[in-house]
Image (spheres, rainbow, N blue to C red):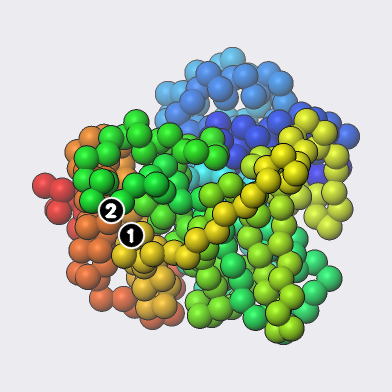
Amino acid sequence: MKTISLLGATGSIGVQTLDIIRKHPDSFQLAAFSAGKNEQAAQNIIHEFEPALVSVMEKEAAERLQLQFPSVRILYGKEGLEAAATIAEADTLVNAVIGSVGLEPTLKAIKAKKNIAIANKETLVTAGHIVTAAAQQAGVHLLPVDSEHSAIFQSLQGEQEKNISRLILTASGGSFRDKQREELESVTVEETLNHPNWSMGAKITVDSATMMNKGLEVIEAHWLFDLPYEQIDVILHRESIIHSMVEFHDRSVMAQLGSPDMRVPIQYALTWPDRLPLPDTTRLNLAQIGRLHFQEIDFDRYRMLHLAYTAGRTGGTMPAVMNAANEEAVAAFLDRKISFLQIEEIVERTMEKHTPVQSPELEAVLEADIEARATVRSLLS
């Protein structure tokens, strides 16, 4: 029996994690979760899973929930998030929150000797050097939940890292993969959120359309698998069947394939090195699919992916600045304050204004995040 603390229980990854716990009650138990502002969803989860601790964003919601569930410890805000991450009853933290808010709870969970199933990209993007060093020191595992990193992780089972030639991350191309760059000037929020392959949250779906999502994954892969950016490639793959690949020195290529279903990598992160059945996912039928398509990345077309490689290679606080600027710009786009292409313009200008600090401590990373958000607000105004 593994006991799970789940940050971001009401988002796409969180909901699918709960489904896995629900399907395997003899293998998993939910000890704690966070639910942000979704009070109704928190009520439903408490009724079904009976956790020991729950965190929500606002004090008033916490007080209402505490009256309804007096036997459950209800907290709120940053304190609640960190308490959920470090609860003694849990041995594994699933970090599925969106944004840099996931960083500090993860570090505290690592210090508390929890294994981390990590779906929060920003944790490794903003402070990968700190997180990986802390995990190594604590002797805990960082287990990837993203389908791309899970595919690489699965392809490396039984292999030696010294034999890796390169990692190949696949990218669907997002909502606008069939549009030319000049056609992106007038795309709407609704069009952007219409992803062809995956059902995801709004922020991640926008990042997929700009290709920032893949850029964040490149930086994550750098930290998860300890490889330089020169050995991490991205290729367009429309069908999202091959989730990523590893090429070895002898030119053998290992790939993990499957129908698009995020429960597969989530469950593998929770069961590794074992596997459990997942009978209600769609079985892959290659004969029915017939063809798989691949295409080289055009960095002029996908400017955000270029910016991510630049930030990663620059290092220091630059990835944190890029990430914070992107979060703010995407929020502005979703609020219809800027156009789609202005997202990358704001991110690039914010990066240009920043002087990176190399080998930063956590405080410097957090300061860079705050500085970048202030820069974006000034650009928006």
- Front residue (pair 132, 166): 166
Q: What type is the residue that disc 1 sits on?
A: Arg
Q: Are marks 1 and 2 in contact (CB under 8 Å)?
A: yes
Residue 164, image quadrant: bottom right
Q: Which residue is mark 2?
A: 181
Residue 28 rendering spot, x and y as whole percentages: 80, 38
Point out the tag, 1 or 2, that comes first from the N-terminus: 2
Number of on-image labels: 2
Q: Residue at x 74, y 35 (%)?
A: 282
- Crowdedness of circle 1 by 10 Å Cα count: few (<14), some, many (20+)? some
Q: CA distance from mark 1 to mark 2?
A: 6 Å
Q: What type is the residue that disc 2 sits on?
A: Arg
Residue 202 rendering spot, x and y as whole percentages: 42, 37
Q: Residue at x 80, y 67 (%)?
A: 157
Q: Which mark is residue 301?
A: 1
- Front residue (pair 12, 358): 12
Q: Residue at x 31, y 76 (%)?
A: 356
Q: Residue at x 61, y 76 (%)?
A: 166
**Left or right placement of residue 297 versus residue 69 in this view:** left
